[in-house]
Image: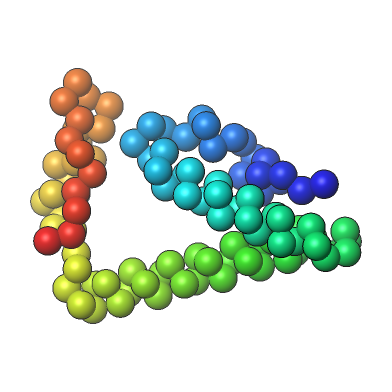
Amino acid sequence: MLSVSNFTGRSAAIAPHHFWAYYAGMNKLLSQAIAVAETFPEDVQEKVARSIMEEAKRLSILKGIADADAGRLVPHEDMKAWAKSLGSDNELPMPTCK
């Protein structure tokens, strides 16, 4: 039987808190990929699930490129300030596109 740990090696719950939304989304997508993969013969289930995840990654990259081409970007200075604040008593919210 496939599980999230087959692919991540750990539970998404251990991810740093500021990345929780990302990991939760990926965990949900991976769970859906596993559910689809389990409809295939057992000897190909892991390959099917990995293929689904690779396609999701590819589509995410294409979306990012389209966003950049359209000018939907996070300014570098905003990212630096956010990254520098991580782990401090005054963490900044994750920056958004301008």
Residue 36: give x, y in percent of width and height: 71, 62
Residue 64: give x, y in percent of width and height: 33, 69
Which quarter of the picture shows residue 67?
bottom left
Q: Residue at x 34, y 36 (%)?
A: 18
Q: 82 above or below 42?
A: above
Q: Residue at x 72, y 44 (%)?
A: 3
Residue 41: give x, y in percent of width and height: 88, 64
Quarter containing the C terminus: bottom left
Q: 51 above or below 83?
A: below
Q: 58 above or below 46?
A: below
Q: Tell me the colour scheme of the image.
A: rainbow
Determine the residue located farthest toward the top in the rendered image: 89
Q: 54 above or below 25?
A: below
Residue 22: give x, y in percent of width and height: 42, 47
Horizontal arrangement in the rendering, residue 1 relative to residue 6 (left or right): right
Horizontal arrangement in the rendering, residue 28 relative to residue 20 (left or right): right
Which quarter of the picture shows residue 97?
bottom left
Q: How many marks?
A: 0
Horizontal arrangement in the rendering, residue 34 relative to residue 89 (left or right): right
Q: Residue at x 66, y 68 (%)?
A: 51
Q: Residue at x 40, y 75 (%)?
A: 62
